[in-house]
Image (cartoon, rainbow, N blue to C red):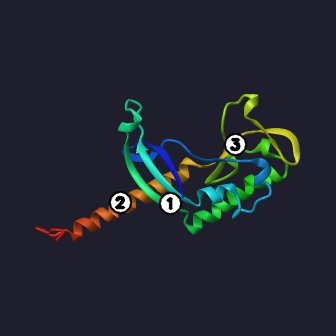
Amino acid sequence: MELKTSPLKVVKSKLASKERLVLNIIDYISEASKTFETSSFWRKNRLLLLLFYLHDSSKMDIDLLFKICRLWEYPEADLKIIRDDWSKIVTKIRNGQAHLLSEADTLYLAACTKGATAASSMRSQPYSPDPAKQRAFSLKSKYLNFIIDDSLKIQSELAVKSAGAYRVNQTFE
């Protein structure tokens, strides 16, 4: 299980992801020889403990309000898309095109740039002499918004069930 925190913002009186969720750095050399099941992405991120907090730059980190805490396993329908996204990323790496990776290539799982734009963030890639920017697997904001909406729906259903089961003068004895 991997623990991840992510900021929320309020958009039209609704909670939404403030940014993508960066997962793990892509090692172009080793990832090229992996299957999805043996990939660094899947080994590290198949089960996520997600903590979403309300972004407020005027508050210290310790004072931020966490709105959602949930264990996330990818639903089968999403997993098919994520597998396809991973395959698109790794196919470019295997074709010596890691330097051509773009977040626009995929739907849910992206290969975002990570680190400075300086030469120090350039990495070697297999099957090409061209260096490639360091990248990390990430979940796009659009997909995070699905997780957020799903989480809030579950919280709402739990609150309704709790209120419906409530009896006056009920105790824990």
- Is 172 above or below relative to 89? below
Mark 1 neighbour density, 10 Å: few (under 14) some (14–19) many (20 or more): some
Residue drawn at (70%, 47%), measured in percent from left and top?
26
Secondary element type, mark 1: strand
87 lies above or below 20: below
Residue that appears at 39% across and 43% down = 12
Q: Which of disc 3 and disc 2 is earlier in sequence? A: 3
Q: Which residue is mark 3?
A: 135
Q: Amino acid at mark 2?
A: Gln
Q: Amino acid at mark 1?
A: Trp
Q: Position of residue 168 (x, y in %)?
A: 12, 68
Q: Element at badge 2?
A: helix
Q: Is residue 173 left or right of residue 132?
A: left
User: On residue 16, which mark appears?
Assistant: none
Which residue position holds label 2?
A: 155
Verify CB contact (< 8 Å) between mark 2 and mark 1: no
For marks 2 and 1 on the same chain, the one whose residue lies earlier in the sequence: 1
> In the rendered image, which residue does mark 1 sit on?
72
Quadrant for the N terminus, please. Answer: bottom right
CB within 8 Å, label 3 to label 1: no
